[in-house]
């Protein structure tokens, strides 16, 4: 077997030329989403041949993890990615995928460990900073979330996503810091966790609808988008509480054969969020009445 020829064949099958190498230098143009299904299956078959002969090859293990991730075989994908990481501790590209897997599993402490390793080498990588804001927000580590958000603000020209993260951070911090009753705070954290589970349940059907028509996309990445958007429906305004639910989040995720994006332009930042702890309490009371 010509190892280099076969590896290169596989590599080019899963390349995504649209990835900006300057933005994501650690990935070196590896595709993370949106390959045609048949192309991924072909890459999968070639990787199986390669791993049959070279079962401990770190590059082949990593690529197999990426391909399985893109095919939404996430439990299998993580096994290959962790094995690749064992073969080469400095394979930091694997850290992104592993961290995102744990975010999808709602194991934010585990995700944080893998992100902290990236920070040593790629402290200004935008994807790292974005994920770090999200993870620390879910862990209620507000000062850390602010630090990463401030760093991201210096690097990102499009401020819409940052504005969304900032709104999420501000209201969540207000709620947590103003809730002195530990039982109430515990219930709030449980509510947040249950909401994440509800998002995942709704996304399963969402994935299937698109898979049925032959559109393939990375389910984990779609969940990360949903997690970023959840505060819109978790903390709606008093006047608009009936208009928002988990489906609203899905409506703000745009999927086609080329892209999966958040429709940030459709968010009304002046009206789609509660602005204060008092407004949050009003919404909570209204929800109790319902």
Image: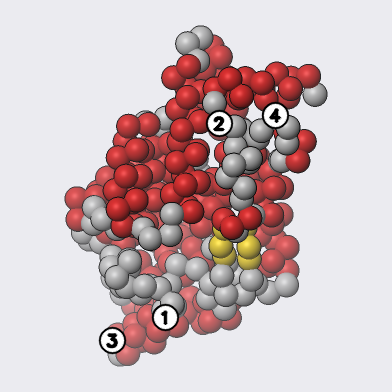
Residue denoted by label 4: 238
Q: Of the residues under marks 4 and 3, which one precedes in the sequence?
A: 3
Residue denoted by label 3: 4
Can residue 9 be spotted in the picture?
yes
Q: From the viewer's perspective, is residue 200 above or below residue 138? A: below
Q: CA distance from mark 2 to mark 4?
A: 11 Å
Q: CA distance from mark 3 to mark 1?
A: 21 Å
Q: Residue 173: percent from the left, percent from the top? A: 45, 27
The answer to which of 149 and 105 lies nearer the viewer is 149
The answer to which of 5 and 185 lies nearer the viewer is 185
Q: Residue 24: percent from the left, percent from the top? A: 32, 66
Residue denoted by label 1: 17
> Label 4: few (<14), some or many (≥20) within 10 Å?
many
The answer to which of 59 and 174 lies nearer the viewer is 174
Q: Residue 199: percent from the left, percent from the top? A: 63, 44
Q: CA distance from mark 2 to mark 1?
A: 41 Å
Q: Of the residues under marks 3 and 1, which one precedes in the sequence?
A: 3
């Amino acid at each position: 077997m010509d190892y280099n020829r076969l590896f290169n064949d596989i590599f080019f099958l899963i390349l995504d030329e649209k990835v900006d190498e300057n933005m994501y230098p650690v990935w070196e143009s590896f595709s993370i989403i949106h390959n045609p299904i048949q192309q991924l299956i072909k890459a999968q078959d070639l990787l199986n041949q390669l791993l049959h002969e070279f079962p401990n090859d770190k590059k082949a293990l990593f690529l197999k993890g990426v391909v399985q991730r893109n095919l939404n075989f996430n439990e299998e994908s993580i096994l290959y990615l962790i094995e690749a990481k064992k073969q080469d501790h400095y394979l930091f590209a694997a850290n992104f995928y592993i961290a995102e897997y744990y975010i999808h599993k709602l194991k934010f402490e585990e995700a944080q460990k893998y992100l902290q390793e990236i920070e040593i080498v790629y402290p200004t990588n935008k994807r790292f900073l974005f994920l770090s804001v999200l993870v620390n927000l879910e862990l209620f580590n507000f000062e850390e979330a602010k630090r990463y958000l401030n760093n991201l603000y210096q690097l990102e020209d499009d401020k819409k996503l940052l504005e969304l993260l900032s709104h999420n951070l501000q209201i969540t911090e207000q709620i947590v810091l103003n809730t002195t009753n530990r039982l109430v705070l515990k219930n709030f954290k449980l509510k947040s966790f249950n909401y994440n589970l509800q998002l995942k349940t709704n996304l399963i059907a969402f994935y299937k609808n698109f898979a049925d028509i032959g559109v393939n996309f990375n389910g984990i990445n779609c969940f990360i988008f949903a997690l970023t958007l959840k505060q819109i429906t978790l903390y709606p305004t008093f006047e608009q509480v009936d208009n928002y639910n988990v489906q609203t989040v899905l409506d703000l995720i745009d999927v086609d054969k080329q892209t999966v994006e958040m429709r940030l332009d459709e968010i009304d930042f002046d009206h789609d969020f509660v602005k204060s702890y008092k407004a949050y309490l009003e919404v909570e009371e209204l929800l109790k009445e319902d």
